[in-house]
Image (cartoon, helix red, strand yellow):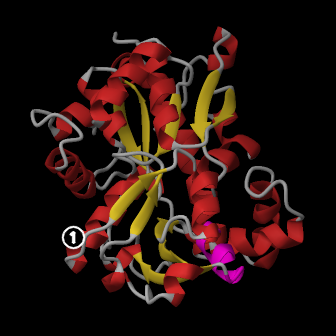
Amino acid sequence: MTKLNRRTALTLMGGAAAASALATPVLSQNRKIKVGALHFTSHSGSFIALEKGHFDKAGLDVELKFFQASTPMAVAIASGDIDYAVTAISGGLVSLADKGAIKVIGGALSEEPGIEGQKILASDAAFQAGLTSPKMLDGKTYGMTSAGSSFHYMGSKVAMAEGVNVKFKPLQKVGAIIGALKSGQIDAWSIVPHIAKPLAGSGKVHIIGNISDYLPNYQVTTVFTSAHNAANERDMTTAFIKGFSAGVADYNAVMVDKTQGEDAINAMVDLIHKYVYADRPREKAAKSIINGSMRLTPGAALNVTSVADQLNWFKSEGLVKDHITLDTLVDASYVKTM
């Protein structure tokens, strides 16, 4: 088993950046499973699984632990502070997989044809100066949390497709990126629709494109855990996937496919609002939560083609070592792969 303390995990990542229930419930074993999450609608599978008892039915006593960005979640998995998490693949996460600390075991959010996805945004200042489409990004500053983040990957792929050069600005936290975009300190960014649309509605930010036009089947976020859990805690890990997948199925039926009616949508919004835009009145938060609905991958299936593309990009940018393979990063034994 490879288990890193927080300091060691952070050091490694810094270098990288230059379906059955348990036979015996975890609760009865006095083990509390901690699941990492962000305050995004894309993490609703975990919220719903907890609130509607799907984790309980799978034999898991779950506590959610919230983070500001993907990199700290990867560190927390490597150091044993949390057991499972849902987040985007980053260069730091890949590097920790190379050290034998973590494994991707499933998929979560993905771009899908016909479902509104992540938006490319421009600040009002940049928009008024001519940044009205991704074709005009040449020489512009693009926000990201850190080098090797999903924002870095998306921005680079858009720039490559358009044949332009962008200057990336690391700002560590999503909130800091939002502030910089609204104030014109950066020119562009890309983010999920439940954040993008309200920003555009403020008049300080404009939507200029869609990530799906450049990455149509992008595996935006993945489910991951420690290499130890993936290899040696198969019952617990299978139970987690089962509970999480039940939450995902509920979310997709109600919020994406809309097969359960308006009452179900309102009830689901109430549940999600506990975790997303909790500081806003329900009536103001509801529109963003509903408009931000993107499909979560049924059964936590994983698009390994997309993951492989991301891994190859990290290598091409010198963000991870060339010898790392898809098998280093992914344990494909828990879910269907595409």
Q: Amino acid at mark 1?
A: Met
Q: Report the label total.
A: 1
Residue 121 at x, y percent in the picture: 50, 75
The residue that label 1 is drawn on is: 160
Q: Is residue 309 left or right of residue 80?
A: left
Q: Is residue 226 left or right of residue 294?
A: left
Residue 312 seen by the camera? yes
Q: Main secondary structure of the magenta part?
A: helix
In front of the other: 302 or 209 = 209
Report the magenta residues as a range: 195-203
Q: Residue at x 64, y 10 (%)?
A: 29
Q: Quadrant of the C terminus?
A: bottom left
Provide the secondary structure element on which disc 1 rests. Answer: helix
Q: Is residue 52 left or right of residue 322?
A: right
| Relative height, residue 245 to residue 189 (above, below) | above
Residue 126 at x, y percent in the picture: 50, 80
| Relative height, residue 141 to residue 120 (above, below) | above
Q: Residue at x 62, y 18 (%)?
A: 26
| Relative height, residue 110 to residue 205 (above, below) | above
Task: Tell me if mark 1 has few (under 14), some (14-19) or many (20+) residues whose alpha carbon lies within 10 angstroms of its own.
Answer: few
In front of the other: 220 or 248 = 220
Quadrant in the rendering for residue 124: bottom right
Q: Residue at x 24, y 79 (%)?
A: 162
